[in-house]
Image (tube, rainbow, N blue to C red):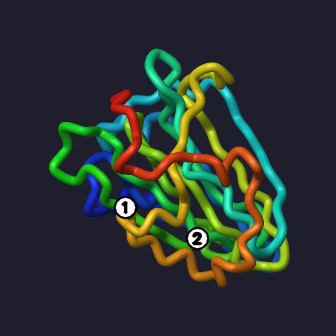
Amino acid sequence: MEFVKTALDGVFILEPKVFTDERGYFFETYKKSDFEAAGLHYDFVQDNQSQSSYGVVRGIHFQKGEFSQAKLVRVLEGKVLDVAVDLRRSSPTFGQHVAVELSAENKRQLMIPRGFGHGFAVLSETAVFTYKCDNFYNKASEGGIRFDDPALGIDWKIDLSRAILSDKDKALPLLKDFEPCF
């Protein structure tokens, strides 16, 4: 597995080594020793999976305080635009983002450390999305910022007037109103 650095410290695109033959393909999706060799030390404790249809935007979400989470994300079926936003107030890249297309076809993953918001938009008819977390979910610690905040400047690669959002995501604050928690 190749760990590709991004413009945001700690965010990596993971490019797997895929072995194919007449039977199909095989690749390692996670190997602790590879992560440690790349200087990434995570103890993943929870796996999550979602299924969504075209135009669904989930995020931008995070967990606050002691329940902050790092996430290793990938797509099992379909295609998404995956986004990590630096929410560390003391970071020189605060408010900046990395966006990468993840798909069942390209088999890429994105490693998002604690202190980042995360969201994705579904670009295919449907998508099955999975992620490993290094901390347990805690409802009281969830937070988020608006996916369409002009200050973020994210091109979600979909028609935003047709974006499908949860009521919770529609009510999230803008980055300028975000209360520091990292």
Quadrant of the rendered image containing residue 181? top left
Secondary structure beneath dot 2 equals strand
Locate residue 163, reporting x and y percent: 71, 72
Residue beneath disc 1? 97
Locate residue 108, reporting x and y percent: 55, 65
Q: Who is closer to the viewer here, 179 or 22?
A: 179
Mark 1: which amino acid? His
Mark 2: which amino acid? Leu
Secondary structure beneath dot 1 equals strand
Locate residue 89, reporting x and y percent: 25, 39
Quadrant of the rendered image containing residue 56? bottom right
Say whether residue 121 is left or right of residue 24.
Answer: left
Closer to the chain start, of discs 2 and 1, is 2
Q: CA distance from mark 2 to mark 1?
A: 12 Å
Label annotation for residue 71: none
Question: As displayed, is residue 76 above or below residue 132?
Answer: below
Q: What residue lies at 63% left-to-right and 19% top-to-bottom? A: 140
Say whether residue 152 is left or right of residue 88.
Answer: right
Say whether residue 156 is left or right of residue 14.
Answer: right
